[in-house]
Amino acid sequence: MDKTGIIVVSICVLLLGWWFVEQNKLAQQQALYRQTNELVQAESRLAAAKASPAEAMATPTLATATIPAAFNPNLPEQLLVLTNAQARYTFTSRGGGLKLVELQNYPQTISARWKTKSGAQTNGVASLNTLALVPALAVLGDDRLVGDGNFILSTNGNGVRAEKTLADGLRLVKEFHPGSNYLVQASVRLENTSAKPLDLPAQEVVVGTGTPMDADDNNFMSYGGAMWFDGINPQVCNPGYFNTNTTLLGIFPHTPHSDYRAGVSNVVWAAVFNQFFALAVMPKQPAERILAQPVTLPQFRNIELAPGAPLPQGVQAALVYPAQTLTANSSVERQFVLFAGPKEYRTLARVGAELQNHADLVMNFGTGFASFWGIGTFFAKFLLSGMNALHDLTRLGYGWTIVLITLLLRGIFWPLMAASTRSMKRMQALKPEMDALKEKYKDDQTKYTQKQMELWKKHGVNPMSGCWPMLLQMPVFMGFFTMIRSAIELRGAPFLWVTDLSKPDTLFMIPGVNFPFNLLPLLMGGAMLWQSHLTPPSPGMDASQQKLMRYMPLMFLVFLYNYSGGLALYMTVSTSLSVLQTKLTKNLKDPAALAAPAGPRVNPALTPASKSKK
């Protein structure tokens, strides 16, 4: 390896190490801030409770209605469980809501990088609202709505009923009826059982808490959080929104946010989600706004973490309804449809079509630049549907299905790539003449450009032919990238040595540095490096630029090293096929070269002007 290569490799290794250190440092800082903040709030509540009644009344109410301490833990917790073919629903008396949803058809997965004790954090299946201390459809906001937070649960046919009556005569009644497609029909009724009007404060109906799937879910910061739909566009609030740093990139000022509030009586639905699962609440009538807050979760049970590792973080969301007055012996009822299940496109599309509310947007394929301004989203849906169709047709595992769909895509783009390679070869063959033109017209850039274009035109060379294939493939790549990261079908899907295509293919942790050894990204980087050395350099590029471009694939290795095995598999196969195509194209004769007249080519632009005789 030459000097430039050594420098580039060293920079990439340093960047990779710096990225991991900074990610760990950021997570620890956020966890410390959350824990400190909650400790201060707990001490404030304790001090207020010990104060005299007058002082307690004078103590301002903090905007922390979602703190689970609102539920009296001294009362026994009552649990009711309903089960169908798709899910196991656990309801709790603390908050009178849906505490946990366990998905029967999606096993729990744990990466090899974590040590496990006997057992698992759940019943061995994936779950929603995991570790959350507030159930879905708990009503929070003001103490007049919460009381001690404990309800009475009872069965109601094939559903569950939760009831609670507060001191002022306000009674809360909730009903839950699980159905198909991971849906639960629910209602929340507020009844005034007194003989006088009741002023209801603003109510926060909890959607649930978006949590990491397990202790290895490093993607939650990027692919988790809360989102809502206003009838036109989806809006997303990722955990990074609550970043407590006062600067961005250490330069730009940043104001930390303690909560996220949005909506103007147009919240069609709201959801909390992680990479592959979502809990969405879809009201019959739009809510006033959405409220999302960061929460610190208990540690995953039966998982041994490194000393000093931060507690897991989640995002809790709620639908907010305005304050109102209930006349004597009247009530207000709000109806909801809950979706608690996998982010499986076909299922969500059916739900969205049935309810006419675009529920498939919960897939969160991205918007703007993240989805190539909608083009990537289109290809993500198309490729996801195509991958599932191939899987159903061939009965191959999803790893081999990715290989097959990559072969098909490469076959479609083969003519373009072949034309691009031939054009680059022609341009490379013209390099001596172009260098001569550059030297001859070094003082006249306009003339040089004109003669350069004449030279390209004469030999049938299109300088843009090398760019068009890459530009045309970019939306497809963006769509494939988005599809791979969102496809729950890959979760737990094995391929050769890979145990889970939705996670990095960590074979082991390197002793001493606690760094994961991921084989597929290394193979991908090697294939990219091989391809860069086979691709002819662009004419006009100096030697240092050529060396830098040849080692540019190492930057891809740095940024994609910890991505999913499915993406690394696609990139490895695609790049290997590109290497094969480059070799085959180099061995083919150029039709344009065969058609050219025999004998040396003479370019008028290079012919010196004849001298007049004196």
Image (spheres, rainbow, N blue to C red):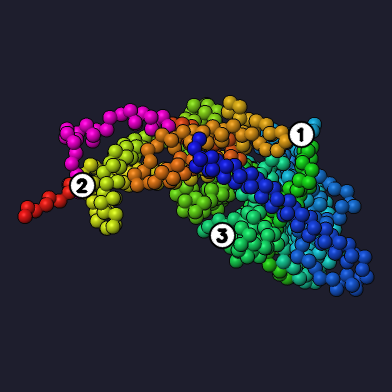
Cα separation, mark 2 vs mark 3, equals: 65 Å
Q: Nearer the viewer, residue 237 or 574?
A: 574
Q: Are marks 2 and 1 in contact (CB under 8 Å)?
A: no
Which residue is located at x 20 percent, y 48 percent?
605
Cα separation, mark 1 vs mark 3, equals: 42 Å
> Which numbered disc flags the more N-terminal residue, 2 or 3?
3
Number of residues whose C-alpha sits closer than 10 Å to that of mark 1, classed few (under 14), some (14–19) or many (20 or more): some
> Which numbered disc flags the more N-terminal residue, 1 or 3?
1
Q: Reply yes or no: does residue 29 show up in magenta.
A: no
* Residue at numbered disc 1: 116
Q: Residue 53's image quarter?
A: bottom right
Number of residues whose C-alpha sits closer than 10 Å to that of mark 3, classed few (under 14), some (14–19) or many (20 or more): many
* Residue at numbered disc 3: 230
Badge 1 element: strand
Q: Residue furthest left?
A: 614
Image: magenta residue range: 579-605
Q: Residue furthest front?
A: 614
